[in-house]
Image: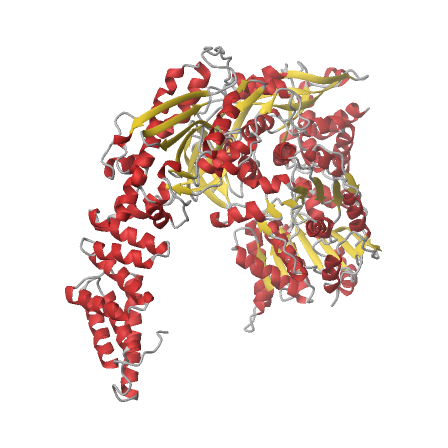
Amino acid sequence: MNVTQLADQLRKDPHFMENVTRWEVVPPRPARTADFPESVDPRIRDVLAKRGIHALYTHQAQSLAATERGEDVTVVTPTASGKTLCYNLPVLSAILKNPDARALYLFPTKALSADQVSELYEMIELMGADIKTYTYDGDTPAAARKAIRQAGHIVITNPDMLHSGILPHHTKWVKLFENLKFIVIDEIHTYRGIFGSNLANVLRRLMRLCDFYGSHPQFILCSATIANPRELATTLTGREVTLIDDNGAPMGERHFVFYNPPVINRQLGIRKGSIPVTRAISGLLLKNGISSITFARSRLTVEVLTKYLKDMVRDPLGNAGRVRGYRGGYLPSERREIERGLRAGQVDAVVSTNALELGIDIGSLDACVLCGYPGTIASAWQQAGRAGRRQSASIVFFVASSSAIDQYIVTHPDYFLKKSPENALLNPDNLYVLISHFKCAAFELPFEDGDGFGNAPGTEEMLDYLDEAQILHHVDGRYHWSSEDFPASQISLRSAAEENFVIIDITDPARHRVVGEMDRFTVPMLLHENAIYMHEGRQFQVEKLDFEACKAYIRAADTGYYTDADLNLNLSLLDIEKEENTARGYRVGLGEIKVTALVTMFKKIRFDTHENLGFGRVRLPETDMHTTAMWWTMPPDLTQSIPSDTLKNGMMGVANLLRIVCPLYLMCSPQDIAVVYQVRSPVTGEPTLILYDQCPGGIGLSQKAFNMREMLLERALQVVNDCGCPQGCPSCVGPVGEVGSDGKPTAIRILKELMA
Amino acid sequence: MNLRDKLRAVGGSGGARTKQEDGGSAAPGDCRYLAVKRPLSEFPGALAVRGETLEKMTGTEMPSPFDPKRILYLDTETTGLRGSGTVAFLVGLGYLTEEGFEIHQFLMRDYDEETYLLKHVEAGMNRFDMLCTFNGSTFDVPLLEGRLLMNRFRRDCLDKPHIDLLQLARRVWKLRLKRCNLGRLETVVLGAPRGEDLPGSEVPKRYFTYLKTKQESLLDDILTHNAQDIASLCVLLTHMAEMYEHPEQVAFSEDLYSMGRSMEKNRRPEEARRYYQLARMGRMRGEAGLALGRNLRRAGERDQAEALWSEMIAHGAGGVQPYIEMAKLLEHRKRDYKGALEMTERALLRLSEERLREDRTVQETKNALQYRRRRLKKRLASRPQNDDAGRPEEER
């Protein structure tokens, strides 16, 4: 059976269709092509012709033309639209023309780099050209490093390695820096939040060194579809970019099916699980010989689903091998084998975590099943993009879990189908981030009086501060690094605070191993002594937390309960950036706050039943965090006309709604922002709703929320209005047990007042 | 809240520092310069070091005509260990003259003096043919290269034959001493332990304290330490050259054996034999014998090799290996299958007698021998013995 036949059959099945909230058919789109421009080296054209490529898609031609004009380019196209040619063509042409030319490729993960290298190798080999392409990362053997530094035309690496392995050793990379023509950064939508803020500063450092060595590289950036690719690219690189987002690649007909598992307990609003439903849908595809990829959110779910599907086709002929699991933690060789199997069509069904989401080449499949929302629309589209034939039809199923965000999407499919609403945000000028990179930059090359650091503000104050702190040493118009530390080793690009805690598993006394890291602001919540720490689905108990040494020691434990720390939060105002008095008499503000967190006790909660099994005490110092925040005070009419308990319940409801809505529009995970309500807020002195960046220094979420506050309120109102529950549920204002029976109507009233 | 207050809040500590003005003893526009002269009597034999000995030791060509006075000894003191932000704040240069050993030290009293320091170092280096350092090929030279680059100097002053004594010392002493840092070599090899000395790891901290306080006396220890390092380089080089020239005066069998290995590495197998022969007289009898035997076999000196294996078997030196070598020789060279089988049996016996650890190599050796035994038995069974014994056959 093919996809079209299956779609027809399903649409005639009333049992299936009663849970489908939307069935969208996107008509096929023909290819739009353009001839190769003259500038493409004939050797490259020959090689492409051998691979069956005789013309460029329009977006490839456009990006090539812009690159040739010397512009910095950002290409926004979906999965499998041939975006790699957008950067490989100009880079290879430049190197063929001038063998001294160099290019630097940055990918967010190792698997992606490996995939890129093999594709480049293949092209270069077919051309018979002497172009050396190397991966330079933590796995590169020491013996090979020297050759790469000297002779690598194309150096493929990741931001972490650039930060700690290349920039601080730039004098060994003279050839690269002197001749750098292109900086290629793929998957830039992954560089948001702290990671993006760090990368932007790594790029400031890179450009500073290029200046020193006299090179002027161009940027070629690629992104999945998000709402603000140009803003993201500009914030990352500090440059204006040319946006190429008119995809010329062909696409067959596509079906998008939104499936909400049926409610099995009306009172509690409990739905059938997404895993059994996914099992049924993926199984149906497998039985009908339709190649598919199923995305699950956890490694455990991947394993469970893989087993179900394997069991379905297991026979003495070894057909179970047609079903494969794929996730981080598999050996690289095993992963490569699965990727080959997929490309060759020997694997019919693969179940994967988001490990296969980014551009690893596995060819195209007929169908894709998303078991739960992957966290961002960009990810969802990238996962969905794994299914999509250029000629024939393909189908994507979205199976919603019972989480509030999943429920929002399955009931508002336009959020997914229409123009992307997500903004990838970062804040290169986050002080915590900035100060760390100032240190690295000063180590790499002394600052001179009057020097800037990209477009960072307050360079002089920053340098003087570091001089006073005796980290830099100012003499004769220059700021020199004057500490024996190696600053790059103290910063992790993927987390906020300077001092991360390491988590050490001491289950095996002979082999203590580090299993993870956590930033110091989260540690009191999750790693206090006797906390149950979950890692890859396993439970550990925290045996000792050494706050001084930044270490937490955990031991495997099978407790049957988890812990939830009671956090006392104190917010105080540091600085008001903007505050508006509205006509309705309430205020909306943006500014900086100090969040003081103190954990004093924790609850033990039984798995499944969620019974409270008791309390434990926590003795830890307070932690302070400076961050950005936005706030709404409550309209005076309202506060004067309703009892304060009712007001409190309503505010709690609005806070819960904002927690659901904000991550969708700010492209962050729910834990990146906090929304709190205070009946008497020390920040404003009034009843206030406060939203803040849950990360030291802030990454721009509050600013963006401030700018789009009308829309956030509107969406929150839409969620609560559209929710069918009588008095509140976790998918809107929160369960009635928490917000009370007046919570839902009051929340609606508050939202309407704030929008009026 | 202004940026400064925020920075304080973010950074926690910080506090203002009282800047001390420079003492004023500096000549403007230059770095500090110190010169020390050591009497020639502290460097016996140094002027007699021959170019060909150094060529032998290093495996690289020396300038011709060779003059030990044209070697520049170099050592740096730095602000750290890695990365392009590490600075050589003190560079010491030493060289021999007919009268003694001159040490010139260039010290930057602050970062603004680095370019003067580099100017002196560049000029100093250009006056010499060769460079001699301790670990310079991985540390001092790349570091200076980086500093020259960052200060926009030419870097060709560093392109000259380079004797890295750490590498050479490791080849000779690693086997016996395990660790080969300069202090240990001074104590154990040169018999001249240092008294009070500033540990190298303390150097960056000391320099930063100096930068903050500008108390020049803080640097005295560093200057002494650096000068001593440079003088030691010359003494050590002389000592090593003498070892290679007069191996009969070398006391340790391990060192002689290691010197033989290093000659093989430098593709001087004949030289190697000389050191192996001497090493066989000491504790390394077995190992040196085996190395010598293999060396002879590779050189095609089969008779000498055979004599050596026999002798080793007779004296029980070198474990099971001489038996194996002998069996190979009998089987493939002499086609004496019976003799080879006998030798294989003895090897197996020897292997079981020795009660060696039953590790993988032993097991592999045993397997190989058993395989050899089976093959020899088959050969003996398939054709009459000795019809063409003595005709050589290549070992596969």
In this view, the residue in front, A217 or A327, is A217
Above or below, A283 against A248 in this view is below
In the image, residue A178 lies at what x, y percent? 63, 39
Which residue is the extreme one toward the left?
B315
In the image, residue A741 lies at what x, y percent? 68, 30
Position of residue A18 in the picture relative to residue B158 (left or right): right
Above or below, A424 against B283 in this view is above
In the image, residue A279 lies at what x, y percent? 63, 57
In the image, residue B52 lies at what x, y percent? 35, 48
Q: In which quarter of the image is residue B343?
A: bottom left
* Quadrant into which the C terminus of chain A falls: top right
* Quadrant into which the N terminus of chain A falls: bottom right
Q: Is residue A728 visible?
A: no
Residue shown at 50% from the left, 36% from the top: B157
In this view, the residue in front, B263 or A73, is B263
Residue shown at 72% from the left, 61% from the top: A47
Residue shown at 68% from the left, 30% from the top: A701
Q: Count how many numbered circles sit on residues in the image.
A: 0
Above or below, A344 against A657 in this view is below
Position of residue A724 in the picture relative to residue A146 (left or right): right
Residue shown at 26% from the left, 56% from the top: B274
Above or below, A541 against A135 in this view is above
Position of residue B26 in the picture relative to residue B57 (left or right): right
